[in-house]
Amino acid sequence: MQHTAIVNSNQLQLMVQFMQQRQIALSEVFDAEQLALVSAACAGQQISHVPVAQFVLMLEQLAEYLQEPTISLSIAQGINTANLGILGYLLHACENMGEALLRLQRYGKWISNNMEYMQIIQQGSQIELRWPKPKLAEGIMHELGMAVIQQFSLQLVGRPLNVNHVHFVHALRGAPENLKIYEQFFGCPVLFEQPYSAFNFPASTLSVPIEKPDKALLDILQQQAEQALNSMPSTDIFLQQAQRKLIELCQLGEPTLAQLARQLHLSTRTLQRRLMQHEVSFQQLLDEVRQQLCTQYLHQHVPLSDIAQLLGYSDQSAFTRAYKRWTGSTPLQQRRLKH
């Protein structure tokens, strides 16, 4: 089955934020259908993702209205990790830039599915982030994706990446002089009409430490984790340790038995045996932890897409299926019942 290319609705919010800063009325650029889409996205209603084709069309309309072919760079300049909600926190919680890139690759689909297809390739002392050839006019999404990564580096490590070169598979839009704008933004040579889109920088960048996240958000998440642990049935010290480690692992992605075993300094076989002694499987323990965490996040009105990330699910639909298996209803239905 072919999947429709999507972007997270927060990209529409960023576009609106950019237009507000420029004092541009939405109705001057978008038609009634597009205005309804923007309104729903910005209000957090009904939709969490938007087809890439629709988003690209709106970007192009805005670029034409402003006579600004480099619109993707202009929008990216206003982006910071706070715009990503929980994903922004998860990026700041990484130890170094290498870990942050891996997490961005995993969860990048929440920004755009182009991020999901990003390849991280090491070539000797260099790292190359590479994207497959885009469809039709979607090359502008590669521009936005690379510009966002460059902008995020300012937030994550306090300075832009020392980029060697940037390649785009699509053609330069607008006048040839626009090339200077790209080179100034990325601080390196930029080439268009290349075999693939790529972002090249020294491998030493991967070890650059990340500045830590906002302490207030960190405290809130830790408090919710503690409340989730306290809500679980009374268990012995071993299971409590396992539950605590699973909460930490959920923030890194889908937890595995092997990961939990390493965290507890046990072999996989020993962990399986000890879980059997407590008459619980790894999946049962993981489900229990996730369900209790989910309860806390739902009460705190954390967005459903953020909850999915915090619980380690690859996407929101996987989280919704799991929640329905636990409770018989969807998280959205459960949240509506609370109102």
Image (cartoon, helix red, strand yellow):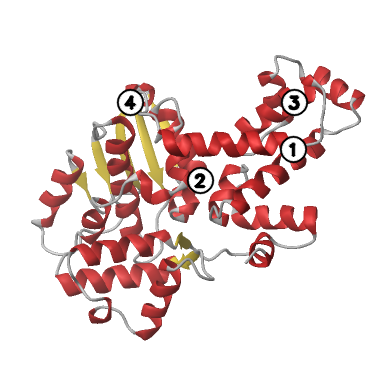
Mark nearer the N terminus (1 vs 3): 3
Eye-nearest disc, 3 or 2: 3
Distance (Cα) linking label 4 and label 1 = 34 Å
Query: Residue 109, which numbered label?
Result: none
Distance (Cα) linking label 2 and label 1 = 20 Å
Distance (Cα) linking label 2 and label 4 = 21 Å
User: What amino acid is at disc 3?
Assistant: Gln
Question: Split into 4 quadrants, where in the image is the C terminus?
Answer: bottom right
Distance (Cα) linking label 3 and label 2 = 28 Å
As helix, strand or loop, the secondary structure at mark 1 comes to helix
Residue placed furthest toward the bottom:
32
Query: Along the horizontal axis of the image, is 205 left or right of 301?
Result: left
Residue located at (26% from left, 33% from top): 161
Residue with the mark numbered 3: 240
Residue with the mark numbered 1: 286
User: What amino acid is at disc 2?
Assistant: Tyr
CB under 8 Å between discs 4 and 1: no
User: What amino acid is at disc 1?
Assistant: Leu
Residue located at (78% from left, 20% from top): 237
Eye-nearest disc, 1 or 3: 3
Mark nearer the N terminus (4 vs 1): 4
Question: Split into 4 quadrants, where in the image is the N terminus?
Answer: bottom right
Eye-nearest disc, 3 or 4: 3
Query: Along the horizontal axis of the image, is 81 left or right of 4?
Result: left
